[in-house]
Image: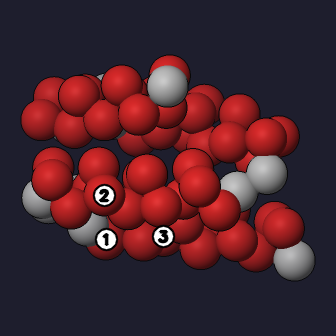
């Protein structure tokens, strides 16, 4: 089930990536719900996902906190 939650949050983040504020809010929610090893995987995915989306780069602050 843990894997399903990580995939769910990846999907949500992809869908809300049009709005940086909403993206950050959903990222914070994901971080609060996922397990530590899932957060590490989410960090890796996030770095790859935002390469061509400079408006989302500030969301990296939440992942480092």
- Element type at marker 2? helix
Q: How many marks?
A: 3
Residue 43 lies, in percent from the top left, at: 58, 33
Above or below, 3 against 52 in this view is: below
Compared across the picture, whether 61 is left or right of 5 comes to: left
Whole-angstrom CA distance, mark 2 to mark 3, is 14 Å
- Element type at marker 1? helix
Label 1: which residue?
A: 15
- Quarter of the image with the N terminus is bottom right
Residue 60 lies, in percent from the top left, at: 37, 28
For residue 59, which quarter of the picture? top left
For residue 15, which quarter of the picture? bottom left
Q: Which circle's residue, 2 or 3, is located before the other in the chain?
A: 3
Marks 3/1 in contact by CB < 8 Å: the verdict is yes
Residue 23 showing in the rendered view:
yes
Q: Which mark is residue 25?
A: 2
Q: Which mark is residue 11?
A: 3
Q: Which circle's residue, 1 or 2, is located before the other in the chain?
A: 1
Q: Residue at x 23, y 28 (%)?
A: 58
Q: Residue at x 12, y 35 (%)?
A: 55
Compared across the picture, whether 23 is left or right of 14 comes to: left
Nearest to the observer: residue 50 or residue 1: 1
Report the mark closest to the observer, 2 or 3.
2
Above or below, 42 against 12 in this view is: above
Report the mark closest to the observer, 1 or 2.
2
Compared across the picture, whether 39 is left or right of 63 comes to: right
- Element type at marker 3? helix
Instruction: Assess disc 2: are there few (<14), some (14-19) or many (≥20) residues with their C-alpha within 10 Å of its C-alpha.
Output: some
Whole-angstrom CA distance, mark 3 to mark 1, is 6 Å
């Amino acid at each position: 089930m843990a894997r399903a939650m990580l995939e769910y949050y990846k999907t949500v983040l992809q869908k809300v990536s049009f709005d940086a504020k909403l993206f950050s809010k959903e990222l914070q929610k994901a971080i609060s719900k996922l397990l530590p090893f899932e957060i590490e995987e989410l960090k890796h995915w996030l770095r790859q996902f935002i390469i061509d989306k400079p408006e989302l780069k500030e969301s990296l602050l939440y992942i480092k906190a």
